[in-house]
Amino acid sequence: MNKKISLRTVDGKMKTFNIKVPAGIRNNEKIRLIGQGKAGQNGGKNGDLFIKIQIEKDSKFELVGYDLYTSLYLTPWEAALGTRVNLEAIDDTVSIYIPAGIESGEKLRIPGKGYKDGKGGRGDLTASVKIMVPKNLTKEEKELYEKMKEISQFNPRNK
């Protein structure tokens, strides 16, 4: 990926640099721009400029090593019945199978969909299941939940 940055030079002028950010670069690693630093003394060559990389926190993903962690939000009926859902990965969307009866807190691992390691490999993407209950039910939804309450033998407190 290429990134443009503007920096103020020692003489106070702004200079723009086009930096090639290699895949798999780690937090706090440096990119060296040869000859882009301070001017050399007595006709010597320019020094090098080092750019320290700071990987921003993301609201969707947590980076641990080369693995990415995210949340996967499901409805109660998707969790109970099982389904197939699309999950956003860092650079594409993957379709994953959700087994019937999955519970909040369970994790699904998608191999090779994590952060690039810079050597052609990738970490994994792990999705933590979070079952979301609707806050505002329609009349029909409320009736269906009432019916479930009447007919269901399931009680999570009696495991």
Image (spheres, rainbow, N blue to C red):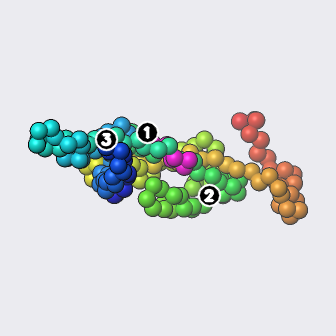
What residue range appears in magenta?
Answer: 58-64
- Residue that badge 2 annotates: 82
Q: CA distance from mark 3 to mark 2?
A: 61 Å
- Residue that badge 1 annotates: 64
- Residue that badge 3 annotates: 10
Which amino acid type is shown beneath numbered disc 2? Gly
Q: Looking at the image, is mark 3 or mark 2 earlier in the sequence?
A: 3
Total residue callouts: 3
Q: Which secondary structure lies at badge 3?
A: loop
**Mark 1 closeness class: few <14, some 14–19, many ≥20 residues within 10 Å:** few
Q: CA distance from mark 3 to mark 1?
A: 37 Å
Q: Is residue 158 left or right of residue 128?
A: right
Which amino acid type is shown beneath numbered disc 1? Val
Q: Residue at x 66, y 57 (%)?
A: 78
Q: Looking at the image, is mark 3 or mark 1 earlier in the sequence?
A: 3
Eye-nearest disc, 3 or 2: 3
* Nearer-the-camera pick, 47 or 75: 47
Q: Position of residue 124 (x, y in %)?
A: 41, 48
